[in-house]
Image (tube, helix red, strand yellow):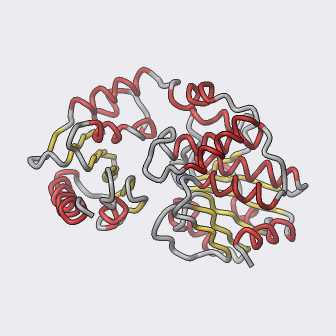
Amino acid sequence: MSLFKQLENIIRNNNSFLLTTHVNPDADAVGSEMALYHLLKRMGKDAVIINHNETPDNIQFLDPENVIQKFERVNPQQIIDEVDVIIFLDLNQITRVASMTEKLRSSSKIKVVIDHHQDAVNFADLMITDTNANATGEILYNFIVQSKLTQIDYEIALPIYAAIVTDTGSFRYERMNPNLHLIASELLKAGIVPHEVADKIYDQSRLSKIKLLGYALSTMVLSESGNIAYMLITTEALENSGAFESEVDGFVNYCLAIKGVKVGMLFFELKDGIKVSFRSKGKIPMNKLAAEFDGGGHTNAAATRLFNVKMEDYLKKIINKAEEYISEYSNK
Ligand SMILES: [Mn+2]
């Protein structure tokens, strides 16, 4: 039986669902949750969404009725005990749910993963992991169309469109394919207005974030080879700017805007360790580079979070490792 058919059966044969996604949720994470939530509600099912984090301001429009709840504010054990199925979206390792990991791991409820990242760890009863998909929202679109469980109307098109736009860097990353533009076309026919969505997601920044971006850009360094550009944000710089930690997402992409640069990195110092974001052009596998330092992700975008370490102990190590990956994979 196909994976979609198995998912359809799980949905049809059960009544209550808990949806969740990864730490620091993006528009693909929240959009996928909301699209599936609407589908389940229309089928008369009970559905709750619980995330480790609050939804970022710029994608709150995907959840206008505030159905997404924050883990630390609810009684998670009670909710987990009451549902039939737990569906994990846009993640393929259970630890990505952060504070919710142990409670969800120890639950004996039916578990489903719908995701598009590489290096999946099988922890669910049904793993729908398609690394060719540009976004988890794209997988859900195909599932809804094929299963015919509901219509792709504006309410469902909006979160799916937001998911696809952000996970493709506005339709320009490497995995883009003709079919995704056909999907986008269908979403536009359902009433999506691209400039309105783009304005909400990208052009509602706070001044403090843009100022911090300015600072981050001013720290940018090119490695000796010219292959790597990286930026550094210290906790002090973050505090001085008044920006939020989550607002740093996406800064790393500016590293790739420099001619000749193949790998971009952002070193972000946090109170209890560091976060490193990796971006690459071509086939240089950032997921593998990140995995050398306990992280993961996609070929062209990955990240790691290291606790209780100092930036200066890792900066050189990570840059050297990145140079090795560049020489190994550049001509592949
Ligand atoms: Mn995604």
- Residue 259 place in picture, x, y as percent: 22, 38
- Residue 210 place in picture, x, y as percent: 38, 25
The residue sitting at the right extreme is: 44
Compared with 121, 267 (above or below) is above
- Residue 246 place in picture, x, y as percent: 45, 40
The image quadrant of residue 304 is bottom left
Pick the residue in front: 183 or 164.
Answer: 183
* Quarter in which the N terminus is drawn: bottom right
Query: In the image, is 51 to the left or to the right of 41?
Result: left
Q: Residue at x 33, y 47 (%)?
A: 271
* Quarter in which the C terminus is drawn: bottom left
Pick the residue in front: 47 or 101.
Answer: 47
Query: In the image, is 124 to the left or to the right of 167?
Result: right
The residue sitting at the front extreme is: 178
Q: Residue at x 34, y 28 (%)?
A: 212
Query: In the image, is 327 to the left or to the right of 173?
Result: left
How many marks do you count on the picture? 0
The image quadrant of residue 155 is top right
Compared with 1, 241 (above or below) is above
Pick the residue in front: 325 or 294.
Answer: 325
The image quadrant of residue 309 is bottom left
Q: Residue at x 75, y 43 (%)?
A: 156
The residue sitting at the top extreme is: 207
- Residue 84 place in picture, x, y as percent: 80, 69
Compared with 242, 7 (above or below) is below
Q: Residue at x 57, y 69 (%)?
A: 102
